[in-house]
Amino acid sequence: MKKGFLLLGCVVVIAITATAVIYRFQKEKPLPVGVIAWLASGAVVGSSELNAGDLFLEEHPNSLIRIFPVDDQWNPVMTRPSVEEAMGNGVRFFVTTHPSKCAVAMMSLFEEPRSLAIVAAATSPALTGKDDYTLRIIADAEHEQRSIARYVNNMEGKRILVLQDEGNLPYTDPAFKSFSAELEALGKWEIVHLKLMVSNFNPDELTPIMKEHYDALFILAGSYQAAIGNIAQLFHHLHPDAPILLTPWARSSAILDNAGPAISKIILPSQYPSRHNDSALDNYFRRFQARFGYEPHSMTIGVRQALELLDSAFSQGHRTPEDVKKYLLSVKAHKTSLGAISFDQFGDVVQPFYFIVDLERELK
């Protein structure tokens, strides 16, 4: 009889122990996070996003996050099937770094709590004010462009040339609409507007237009396209004293290299302060460069913040898209290592913009 009770007791202890082990394993099971980027580009874009994930995990070895690369080549035709394939592989959380044209193409995939995306780049107003499972940690194009217009209004001059990129119209169309409406309402500047494909612009076609009198240039283009620097240099050659404004999505060393002497006249709007005024940002860029041997573009800041937000949610036991969303929206201000993030009820943010005038110092 005693042996029977002893055997039964052993079985109960083993069962309880096994249950606890299984529960702990299930509770602590790693969670894949899809980082959507242009991985096949072979350039800093794409490499920076994944390396940002690598650095985060090296500095947070106990994180439940496991990076799952998703390559959509920043092509809206490829975005939806690439994300659906990742979802089919069990990925329920995503950090997106693609442009607005791609974000709009996949937005319906995040209308239900099957998956959650944290947007670190796309600013299209089509994503704004929606009660879905897309959270955005940067301000939308309308807020961004109103800030830029107010800055332009305080500059000297009366006539500005705006070159709008046709390669990402879900961003640049609403961006130009907001910029022009704000600047025209202020009543000081005349806007000369031209659409072009920045990626394959023709200097011979653009030069006659640029030769006219302008007091400033605004290159309304993003996606870290190196050709932005070439356009800036051409304008600077014709108007050596005129300021040149870019968008926040042109904070790239490749653009600096192509801009040549125009770099002295470039003004860069930014969601983030200069690294020389923010020790946390400067330290991050230094760690990144020391680890990977190159200067990352600014989008890695958003990737790092997004991973910190997900890691915070996971570490507190929130493991489903619905629970993670509720947690992220319930906190008044999330303190990440690279700045605070405050979501509104729809998962959107409003933020100040900084205008960096010494771009060469910033990117070298």
Image (spheres, helix red, strand yellow):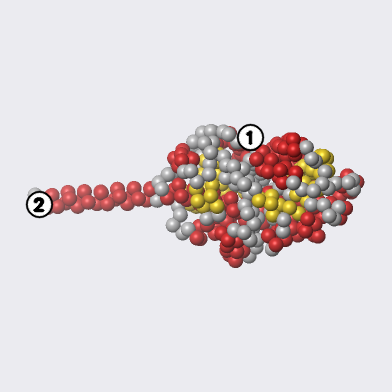
Q: Secondary structure at mark 1?
A: helix
**What x and y, as percent, mark residue 51?**
58, 57
Q: Amino acid at mark 1?
A: Ala
Residue 185, image quadrant: top right
Report crowding for label 1: few under 14, some 14 to 19, many 20 or more residues within 10 A (C-alpha).
some
Q: Are marks 1 and 2 in contact (CB under 8 Å)?
A: no
Would residue 326 be found to the left or right of residue 123 on screen?
A: left
> Which residue is tagged 1?
126
Using residue 123 as the reference point, say whether residue 189 is left or right of it: right
- Seen in the picture, residue 286 relative to 132 is either above or below; the reply is below
Crowdedness near tag 2: few (<14), some (14–19) or many (≥20) residues, C-alpha within 10 Å: few
Pointer 2 residue = 2
Image quadrant holding the C terminus, namely bottom right
Coordinates of residue 224 in the picture (x, y in percent)? 70, 51
- Specify whether residue 251 is in view: yes
Q: Residue 138: x and y, percent?
A: 60, 45
Residue type of the residue flagged with mark 2: Lys
